[in-house]
Each structure stands twice: as C-alpha cells, then as structure tokens.
Image: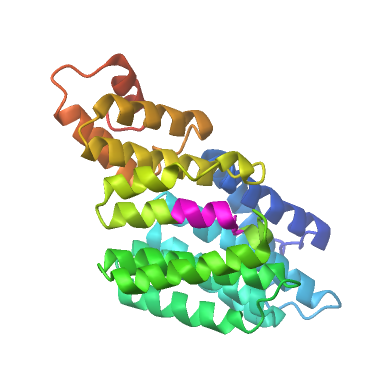
Amino acid sequence: MGEPTTPWPLPQLRNGAVQVNQAYQAAKYKHATAMLPDLIQAADAYDGYQGRDGRETHLARCSVYTAAAKLLTKVGEHQLGWLAADRATHAALAAESPTAQGMAAYQVVIALLRSQQMDDAEHVAVRSAEGLMSLASSDAPDAVSLAGALWLISSVIAARRSDRAASTERLATAARLGDLLAHDGNHWWTAFGPTNVLIHRASVAAEFGDPSGVLRVATEIDTEAMPAGLQGRRSRLHLDLAWAQAQAKNDMEAILHLQQAERVAPESIRYHLIARELVRELLKRSRKPTPALTAIATRAGVLA
C-alpha cells in the first residue's frame, strides 16, 4: 500500500480552486483540465474532514468540484461531470452553505442537461432558484447572483421546451435580480449581471429559432462592461450571432463572428457542440470554402 495522501494546506486548496475557475471562465480549457487531477486529489483528501477549518475547507472543495463539473461536461465527459457535480453538492451540504448549494445545483443542472434529462434539470434549476430568492437582497450579492444564474438557465430550458411564457417570465425575474445587483459581477463564478442577462436573451432567441431576435438583442449588449476574464461569456454572444447570420444565409457575416469568437476565446468553438455543427453546415453549403472557414474548421476539429 502507498503512503496516505497528505492534504494540501487550506490556502493552497482555495487558491487552486480560484485558478481553475479563472482558467475555465477565460475559456482556457486545456490549461484548466491539466490542473484538475492534482486539485481533485487534494480535495478528495479532505473528504469527511471535521477539523477546525471544516466549513472553509468544504467550501473550497465545493469550488474545486464545481470547476471539475464545468470542465468535464464542457469536454463531453457527461457522466464524470455528473459525479463531480454530486461531490460539489455533498461538499456544499457539509459546509451548511445555501449559496454553495446553489453553485453546486447549477452544475447539477448542466450535467443533467448534457445527459438529456431536461425535466430533471428544469426541476432542480427552478427549485434551487426559488430557494435562494428569500436570501436575495441588495446586500447579499452572492444569493442574488446565484438565483439569477439559475433563473437564466431555467429560461433556456423552457425555451428548449418551446414554452415561451415560462421562458419570458424567468428571464424577467433574472433581469430584476440583475437590476438589484446593479453591476456586472462574478460572484461565486456566476458571471451574473445585467449584461449576462442580455446575452441569455440572445441565447433564448436562438433556442426559439429567432435569428432576428438574436440580432436585435445584440445591439443592446456591450460585453466590455463585464469583468475581465469572462472570455467564455463574451465568445458566446459571437457564437449566437454567427448562428443568426447563418440562418439568414449571410455566411460571410457568420464566419466573421466565428472568427471574433475565436479571437476572444481561441478554444471556444472546439468545445461548443452547436458551433461545430454550424461550421459543418457552412462547409456543406459552400462550393469552395474560404481559407478563413477552412482554418476555423481545422482548429475546431471539424476538418482533419
């Protein structure tokens, strides 16, 4: 038998969680993934920990497992993503933190969605959002941000069910929370704020197959208003705009937005299923793909 794992000092574990979450939000997925094995092993070493810094340790573990769930679902490892989200939930419960439980619940929702369990995902999202609403106030930005993020994802889910009334109502609730927060923040790694609400409005319009709605909302969005480092969120708008332009058969405009998405976050297309499908569609209907489209397709792994 090998030597038992020596737990990292709590500040090191906490700092590792910060670094991997920052790398994820910057859309540096390869770098973040390389950090994961040692970080997860360090978090696992504290499983069942009951020491003096128990609550803070469990919060750090929750943050590690949340980042792991994000990354694993992003790269298509849905079952492992679910397991990481479940570990995040247990850590949040051990910390007795409603906000940490909200952060973990968001990743459970994403894992369920990636596994095509949409009804369960919606139930968790709505229940968790409602549970945080009693904590949401102008002096509780964490609860506001987490509730807002959960209402946003639940709005997207409703749009996938073609339930316009529920989607619109949930977006409106998130918008009120964005106004309550009154700034573009990143509390508990949510990237939540008024600008992210607008980005989700564009995404919901795309879910409803409404390219003109995407283009209309985009005129209201200034992604530079968001905190530094949220490159994944910034690139998402360009991906939705690329889809909208492709629907209107404006293929050159679509390619330009794909280039902008890559410029903002070079790994964004490779790890975004719909973006990769869009690149394939543009290739199919192009008699002679432009060098720009060919280069995007190669970098995205669509062309060998």
In the displayed structure, would residue 12 be above or below residue 242?
Answer: below
Q: Which residues are magenta?
A: 190-200
In the displayed structure, would residue 292 be above or below residue 233?
Answer: above
Q: In terms of image quadrants, where is residue 254?
A: top left
Is any part of residue 117 visible from this angle? no
- The quadrant of the picture occupied by the C terminus is top left
| Residue 278 on image: x %, y % | 26, 38
Left or right? Give the position of 69 relative to 15. Answer: left
| Residue 154 on image: x %, y % | 42, 70
**Magenta run includes residue 223:** no
> Image point 25% across, 28% down: which residue?
251
Which one is in front, 150 or 16?
150
> Image point 26% across, 69% down: which residue?
161
Q: In terms of image quadrants, where is residue 135?
A: bottom right
Which one is in front, 298 or 144?
144
In the displayed structure, would residue 70 be above or below residue 141?
Answer: above
> Image point 59% across, 45% down: which residue?
230
| Residue 133 on image: x %, y % | 59, 80
Which one is in front, 38 or 163?
163
